[in-house]
Image (spheres, rainbow, N blue to C red):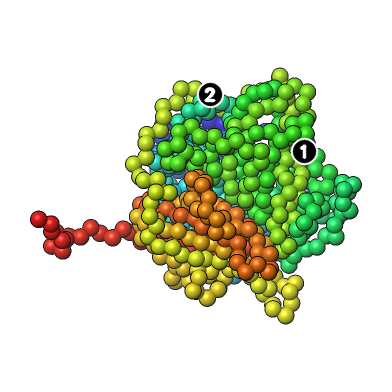
């Protein structure tokens, strides 16, 4: 826990003892959900040493993991706004071959130069880190994933940056972002949570609540040849696969999923779905922080007690309190279920069941479209009301000082400088063979569709720091996509052209699939904030279904410095 903050060099323990055991170990099916290990800042600084490893597990899959100096896997990084993060990342990836094939990968096998900050090239053994959701600069040693690639067995690479003083309190996360290889590694477990402390300062109704962190990941099916369980309502559907090998959407809410799921690394494999166990004191209120760290799986979370959905009090989305930049006070949205696209995060109040109640955390089925992956209804964890359950290791401050009022205008009240349209599209690599791998595109309207090219010299979009823009994002495909932009957040204004009153900020949003016949394509309209001076530079926007990202559905945006104020010699005068 706190004592695990790394202050020395990579220890013999991290290099040696942890290798004697399975380096990316997984708990047994049906285990009690553990609290993930944590590293906490002290005196305004968090020092972390992570070693990035892979290995082939007993089932024949390649696992990827971040191991800290004490041998703990995927520690949660806990900091406060204004803190310094000093993270040394040692790449120890090896060329390993899975005994069972995983998903397909597309990327040029490029040579990595000796300068991790300037290569612009990548291969299957290079790595980097993306600090998803944080508004830190897209620069080397901070949050650049366009040119920063760390080769294996190089000296530890230093990430050094300050959490902005005005960073919103909430849940963020870290994962690798090497084009062409991100999906494979995230499926293998390469992810961890980041908590910026102080959510109770944004919503004082949370004061004193115990808190828990849950990271839900997906992975290739452990039992891909097992038949679906027949519920008795409908026969198990015929299982179809797309060109990437994923099970296609059945449209029934059941059947074989495209991927298995885990919760805090406890697997819940198809077809039995034996759930993990979450112990909680009867009727205790807790704050749950949930990250969908899946590569391609949508979550539709719900807590069921004695057959009835329970109310969940949402207080933050994608790391941002839902209080309109501090103007809405202690806002709580009470929902019966919560849709989380891949990369989405939610923080909500829940109440433990009564003693003896049958309760569970499930993900409901989600319609990804006829060309999308199958995400059926399935349990994640049984929630056991137990008077002897240990208290969570963390609780929010009991008497928090409210956050200061932001000095910047609320995004929803700012007039956009420009409106743009982008659209998702895709096609088979070989038009004569519909079963060939798919090429994915995200295109600015008026430009020629082209898959992402990491060597392209010019960005797809250029904006000016200080501006706010409205983007309409259309989906011209038969499967859903999840739009994500690095370094900043946005506000959802319209869904399929219909204005919405949802004054919440996000960094990932689902875009519904096209039915193949309607005159208009499904779309979202979002207002994107480029006012933060920290984000000047070049960074990415893409679909966060990582197979789509790896397959080309990604573009670059360059934020230029603000225009200089007019000089005294050229400025107009008023009398």
Question: Residue 216: in sight, yes or no?
Answer: yes
Q: Residues within 10 Å of mark 2 (few under 14, many from 20)?
A: some
User: What residue is shown with label 1?
Assistant: 275
- Which residue occupies the extreme top position in the image? 387
- The residue positioned 73% from the left and 67% from the top of the image is 243
Question: Residue 555: in sight, yes or no?
Answer: no
Q: Which quadrant, please, contains the N terminus?
A: top right
- Which residue occupies the extreme left position in the image? 575
Q: What element does badge 1 sit on? A: loop
Instruction: Describe residue 98's horizontal placement relative to residue 507 as left or right.
Output: right
Q: Nearer the viewer, mark 1 or mark 2?
A: 2
Residue 151: quarter of image: bottom right
Observer-nearest of 382 and 175: 382
Instruction: Describe residue 543's horizontal placement relative to residue 271 as left or right.
Output: left
CA separation in Å, label 1 and label 2: 29 Å
Observer-nearest of 128 and 454: 454
Percent coordinates x, y for residue 173 in the rendering: 55, 45
Percent coordinates x, y for residue 166 in the rendering: 39, 41
Percent coordinates x, y for residue 116 in the rendering: 48, 59
Task: Say which mark, if any, is on residue 208.
Answer: 2
Q: What element does badge 2 sit on? A: loop
- The residue positioned 68% from the left and 27% from the top of the image is 352
């Amino acid at each position: 826990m706190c004592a695990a903050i790394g202050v020395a060099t990579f220890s013999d323990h991290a290099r040696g003892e942890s290798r004697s055991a399975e380096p990316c170990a997984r708990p047994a099916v049906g285990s009690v959900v553990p609290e993930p290990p944590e590293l906490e800042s002290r005196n305004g600084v968090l020092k972390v040493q992570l070693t990035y490893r892979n290995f082939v597990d007993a089932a024949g899959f390649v696992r990827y993991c971040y191991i800290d100096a004490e041998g703990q896997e995927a520690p949660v990084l806990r900091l406060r706004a204004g803190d310094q993060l000093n993270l040394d990342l040692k790449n120890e990836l090896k060329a390993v071959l899975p005994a069972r094939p995983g998903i397909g990968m597309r990327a040029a096998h490029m040579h990595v130069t000796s300068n991790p900050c300037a290569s612009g090239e990548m291969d299957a053994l290079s790595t980097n880190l993306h600090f998803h959701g944080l508004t830190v600069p897209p620069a080397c040693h901070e949050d650049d994933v366009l040119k920063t690639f760390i080769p294996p067995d190089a000296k530890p690479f230093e990430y050094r940056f300050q959490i902005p003083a005005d960073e919103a309190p909430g849940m963020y996360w870290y994962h690798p972002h090497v084009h062409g290889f991100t999906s494979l590694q995230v499926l293998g477990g390469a992810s961890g949570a980041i908590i910026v402390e102080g959510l109770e300062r944004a919503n004082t109704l949370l004061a004193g609540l115990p808190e828990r962190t849950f990271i839900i990941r997906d992975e290739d099916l452990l039992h891909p040849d097992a038949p679906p369980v027949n519920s008795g309502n409908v026969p198990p559907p015929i299982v179809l696969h797309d060109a990437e090998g994923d099970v296609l959407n059945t449209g029934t809410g059941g059947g074989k999923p495209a991927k298995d799921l885990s919760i805090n690394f406890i697997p819940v494999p198809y077809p039995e779905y034996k759930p993990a166990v979450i112990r909680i004191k009867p009727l205790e209120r807790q704050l749950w922080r949930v990250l969908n760290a899946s590569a391609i799986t949508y979550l539709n979370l719900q807590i069921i007690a004695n057959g009835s959905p329970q109310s969940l009090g949402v207080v933050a989305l994608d790391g941002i309190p839902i209080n309109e930049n501090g103007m809405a006070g202690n806002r709580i949205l009470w929902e019966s279920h919560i849709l989380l696209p891949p990369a989405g995060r939610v923080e909500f109040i829940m109440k433990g069941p009564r003693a003896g109640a049958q309760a569970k955390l499930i993900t409901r089925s989600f319609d990804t479209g006829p060309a999308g992956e199958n995400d059926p209804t399935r349990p994640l964890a049984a929630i056991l009301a137990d008077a002897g359950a240990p208290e969570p290791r963390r609780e929010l401050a009991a008497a928090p000082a409210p956050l200061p009022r932001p000095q910047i205008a609320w995004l929803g009240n700012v007039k956009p400088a420009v409106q743009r349209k982008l659209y998702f599209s895709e096609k088979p690599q070989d038009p004569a063979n519909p079963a060939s791998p798919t090429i994915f595109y995200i295109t600015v309207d008026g430009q020629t569709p082209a898959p992402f090219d990491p060597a392209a010299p010019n960005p797809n979009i250029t904006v000016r720091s200080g501006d706010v823009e409205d983007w309409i994002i259309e989906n011209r495909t038969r499967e859903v996509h999840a739009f994500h932009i690095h370094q900043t957040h946005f506000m959802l204004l319209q869904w399929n052209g219909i204005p919405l009153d949802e004054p919440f900020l996000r960094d990932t949003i689902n875009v519904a699939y096209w039915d193949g016949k309607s005159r208009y394509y499904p779309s979202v309209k979002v207002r994107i904030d480029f006012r933060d001076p920290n984000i000047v530079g070049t960074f990415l926007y893409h679909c966060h279904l990582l197979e789509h990202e790896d397959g080309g559905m990604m573009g670059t945006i360059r934020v230029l410095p603000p225009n200089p104020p007019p000089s005294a010699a050229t400025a107009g005068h008023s009398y």
